[in-house]
Image (cartoon, rainbow, N blue to C red):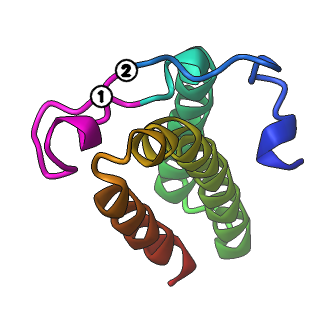
Amino acid sequence: MRPAEDPGRRSGTAPAATGCGFERGGPAEQGRRGSYSTRKRDLIRRLRRVEGQVRGLQRMVDEEQYCVDVLVQIAAVKAALDKVAIALLEEHTRGCVSRAIRSDRGADDAISELMDVIMRFVR
């Protein structure tokens, strides 16, 4: 499923107009807020599911279950976290980065920060 097709995203709605920091002096400014408020409930739900999966992993290790079974569950946790990350990355791009580019204030900083975070995922 592509991020734009995510059922948790309401079609035709723009991200909430929360401050991202770029329009107030650059991405290094403290107190920035995310642009994912329209998907917050979905993200929290996904993170709680991951939390449960991690607790299950702890239980599996404690019970000394078969290595391959534990590794398969680790892969599932990583995949679930990747989905959360992609959703956040999409909201950041559509919200914070888009606003910075449209306003022409902090556009270079926003793009640099976006590229830095993308590079962390492709390593």
Q: Does the segment drawn in magenta span residue 32?
A: yes
Secondary element at tag 1: loop
**Disc 1 + disc 2, Cβ < 8 Å:** yes
User: Which mark sits nearer the N-terminus, 1 or 2?
Assistant: 2
Which mark, residue 33?
1
Q: Does the segment drawn in magenta span residue 44?
A: no
Residue at horizontal 62 percent and vertical 31 percent from the top: 46
Q: Residue furthest bottom?
A: 123
Secondary element at tag 2: loop
Dot 2 amino acid type: Thr
Q: Residue furthest left?
A: 30
Label 1: few (<14), some or many (≥20) within 10 Å?
few
Which mark, residue 96?
none
Residue at horizontal 70 percent and vertical 56 percent from the top: 76
**Residue pointed to by mark 2:** 18
Dot 1 amino acid type: Arg
